[in-house]
Image (cartoon, rainbow, N blue to C red):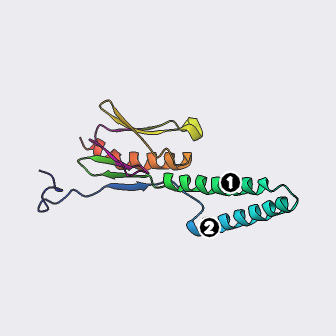
Amino acid sequence: MHAEENPSIPSPPTLFDAVLYPHRSLGPTGFWILMACVSAVSFGAGLLFMLAGAWPVLGFFGLDVLLIYGAFKLSYRAARMVETIALTEESLLVRRVTPRGRVRSWTFQPFWVRVSIDEAAGRDSRLVLSSHGRHVALGDFLLHDERVALAKELRGALAPLKGSA
């Protein structure tokens, strides 16, 4: 029986806890300001073309605004992905929530888990946790330096658990 199933059993202390999510530099207010500026420029340019007799161009400028809006909405939707890592003495739990809300979880025994990253690969490096033939890649949306730092922190948190056996 686990602590989650019975509240009277204390849960083991968390030794490492991280929440990873994609970074978006443009917040909601900035998005609406940008869309207002793009719309104003597109409408103004389209109006000039319409007054010059090329009225179909106005529709293409409107289409541009819709495509930019759609691209940003897709980007913000992708930013809803979340990965969590929780390490206790008994387990390393990785949980991923996709932009659609689908949840996947992986549990590893801390003594056997291996943290690997190809630091020489640069931007294309992958942070991978593996144990007993199972693998999970973490933080594909992170910058290379962030993945390297996460790997170093995770290895540091796992080291005492591996040395105690």
Residue assigned mark 1 = 63
Give the residue type at disc 2: Trp
- 131 vs 150, left or right, is left
- 139 vs 113, left or right, is right
**Label 1 Cα crowd, 10 Å radius (few <14 / some 14-19 / many 20+):** few
Observer-nearest of 61 and 80:
61
**Label 2 Cα crowd, 10 Å radius (few <14 / some 14-19 / many 20+):** few
Q: CA distance from mark 1 to mark 2?
A: 17 Å
- Name the quadrant containing residue 68: bottom right
Question: Does the magenta-highlighted stretch encompass residue 103?
Answer: yes
Residue assigned mark 2 = 32
Q: Residue furthest top?
A: 133
Q: Residue 143, position in %: x, y?
A: 55, 48
- Name the quadrant containing residue 116: top left
Q: Locate the C terminus and report the quarter of the image it occupies.
A: top left
Looking at the image, is 162 positioned above or below residue 42?
A: above
Name the residue at 31% across, 51% down. 87
Q: Residue 9, position in %: x, y?
A: 13, 59
Name the residue at 67% across, 67% down. 36
Q: Residue furthest right?
A: 52
Observer-nearest of 162 and 102:
102
The dot on residue 81 is: none
Q: Which residues are magenta?
A: 95-115
Observer-nearest of 99 and 131:
99
Give the residue type at disc 1: Leu
| Circle 1 or circle 2, nearest the eye | 1
Q: Residue 76, position in %: x, y?
A: 53, 56
Q: Residue 115, position in %: x, y?
A: 40, 39
Looking at the image, is 38 positioned above or below residue 134?
A: below
Name the residue at 66% across, 64% down. 35
Element type at mark 1: helix
